[in-house]
C-alpha cells in the first residue's frame, strides 16, 4: 500500500560482503551521476552492515535484510543456497518497507555512465517503465544457449503455467527492472496469499524473481505497461565483452543507449575490477594469457617487418 511519504522512485542494491568492492564502485558512480538526488537503499545481511556503512551518505542508506526477516529462509530452497534465495526475496519484498512506490533493482557489479533521472524509470503518467525483451541475441549465442538458455526457458515456462499466462513469446528480463509496489502488492494478495504461499514458495518453483514480477504484470495488469529496452548494458559472457573491446566501443558510446554497464562478475570475479573506460590493451589484458600475448607480439613484429620490406 502506497503512502504520501513514499518516494516516487528509488534504487535498490542487494549486496553482501564478498561484493563490497563492486558496491563501492557502483555507489561512487551513483553519487557522480545522481543529478536529481534520488535515494539508493543498500540491503545487506546484518553481519555486513558495519562494513557497508562506509557507503552511507545523503542519498545512500544501508539497511539490514533482517527488516524483511519473516520472509527469509535459513535452508536451501529449490536446490539453491539460502543466501541466493534471500537476495531474490529481498527484491520482491522490499516494497513492504514503504520507502518507494517504485524501485530500480541494480546489481553490485554495475557502473553508471551518465546522469540518472527519475524520468529514466518513470513514464510521463508516473507509472514505471517495464523492461520486457526476448533476449534473442543471447538465444543465438551457442555457448550461452547450451549453458544457460535451455534450463532458463524451461523454468520461465513453469512460471507462466503457474500464473496461467498464455503467452507464446517470453517477454521478461534478466535483471535491472523497475519494480512497482502496486504490482507486487497485487501479486501477493491475488497470487501468493490465495495459495497460502510466501515468496520462497514461488522461488522454489523457479528462482527467477524478475520473471515472476514480469509475468504477473502481463497477466494481471494492475498498472499500465510501458515497455522499453534494458537500461543497463550487461556483458553476459567473456566473448560479448571481448567483442566490444575489439570494436572500440567505450563508455561514451554506451551512454547513448544505456544508463549503466555490467561486466558480469560471474566471469570476472577472479580478475581485477574490470574498468570499462580502460584503453584497449589494458581492457584486453585480463583475457589473454602470457602465451597469447607473446604470439600477438610476434605476429605484430612479422607484419611490421613485411611492411618495411615492401617499402625498401
Image: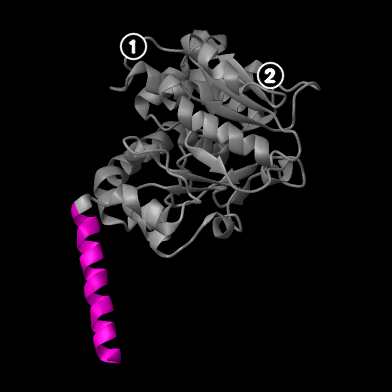
Who comes first in sequence, dot 1 or dot 2? 1
Image location (x, y in percent) of residue 110 = 51, 39
> How many numbered marks are there?
2
> Where are the magenta residues, as a range?
291-312
Point out which mark residue 256 bears. Answer: none
Point out which mark residue 98 bears. Answer: 2
| Viewer-closest of 185 and 119 | 119
CB under 8 Å between callouts 1 and 2? no
Whether residue 223 is visible here, answered yes or no, is: no
Image location (x, y in percent) of residue 112 = 58, 43
Among all residues in the image, which is located at the extreme right? 4
Above/below status of 195 relative to 232: above
**Left or right: 7 in relation to 169:** right
Q: Residue at x 75, y 23 (%)?
A: 6
Magenta residue check for 311? yes
| Predominant SS of the magenta segment | helix
**Left or right: 77 in relation to 229:** left
| Viewer-closest of 52 and 82 | 52
Q: Residue at x 72, y 40 (%)?
A: 118
Whether residue 181 is visible here, answered yes or no, is: yes
Find residue 68 and report its image quarter. Answer: top right
Q: At numbered mark 2, what does the secondary structure look like: helix, strand or loop?
A: loop
- Colour scheme: one colour
| Viewer-closest of 302 and 196 | 302
Point out which mark residue 75 bears. Answer: 1
Image location (x, y in percent) of residue 17 = 44, 20
**Left or right: 130 in relation to 292:** right
Amino acid at each position: 500500500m502506497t503512502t504520501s511519504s513514499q518516494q516516487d522512485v528509488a534504487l535498490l542494491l542487494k549486496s553482501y560482503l564478498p561484493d563490497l568492492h563492486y558496491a563501492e564502485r557502483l555507489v561512487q558512480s551513483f553519487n557522480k551521476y545522481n543529478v536529481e538526488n534520488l535515494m539508493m537503499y543498500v540491503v545487506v545481511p546484518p553481519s555486513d552492515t558495519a562494513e557497508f556503512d562506509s557507503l552511507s551518505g545523503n542519498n545512500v542508506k544501508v539497511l539490514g535484510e533482517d527488516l524483511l526477516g519473516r520472509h527469509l529462509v535459513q535452508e536451501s530452497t529449490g536446490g539453491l543456497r539460502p543466501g541466493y534465495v534471500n537476495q531474490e526475496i529481498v527484491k520482491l519484498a522490499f516494497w513492504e518497507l514503504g520507502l518507494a512506490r517504485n524501485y530500480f533493482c541494480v546489481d553490485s557489479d554495475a557502473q553508471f555512465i551518465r546522469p540518472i533521472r527519475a524520468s529514466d524509470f518513470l513514464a510521463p503518467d508516473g507509472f514505471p517503465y517495464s523492461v520486457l525483451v526476448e533476449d534473442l541475441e543471447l538465444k543465438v549465442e551457442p555457448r550461452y544457449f547450451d549453458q544457460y538458455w535451455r534450463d532458463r526457458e524451461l523454468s520461465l515456462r513453469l512460471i507462466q503455467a503457474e500464473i496461467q499466462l498464455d503467452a507464446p513469446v517470453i517477454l521478461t528480463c534478466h535483471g535491472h527492472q523497475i519494480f512497482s509496489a502496486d504490482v507486487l502488492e497485487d501479486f501477493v494478495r491475488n497470487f501468493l496469499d490465495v495459495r497460502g504461499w510466501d515468496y520462497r514458495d514461488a522461488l522454489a518453483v523457479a528462482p527467477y524473481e524478475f520473471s515472476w514480477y514480469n509475468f504477473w504484470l502481463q497477466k494481471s495488469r494492475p498498472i499500465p505497461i510501458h515497455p522499453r529496452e534494458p537500461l543497463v548494458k550487461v556483458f553476459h559472457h567473456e566473448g560479448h565483452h571481448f567483442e566490444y573491446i575489439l570494436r572500440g566501443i567505450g563508455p561514451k558510446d554506451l551512454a547513448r543507449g544505456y544508463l549503466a554497464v555490467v561486466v558480469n562478475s560471474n566471469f570476472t570475479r577472479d580478475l581485477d575490477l574490470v574498468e570499462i573506460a580502460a584503453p584497449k590493451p589494458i581492457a584486453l589484458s585480463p583475457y589473454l594469457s602470457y602465451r597469447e600475448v607473446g604470439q600477438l607480439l610476434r605476429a605484430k613484429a612479422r607484419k611490421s617487418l613485411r611492411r618495411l620490406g615492401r617499402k625498401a
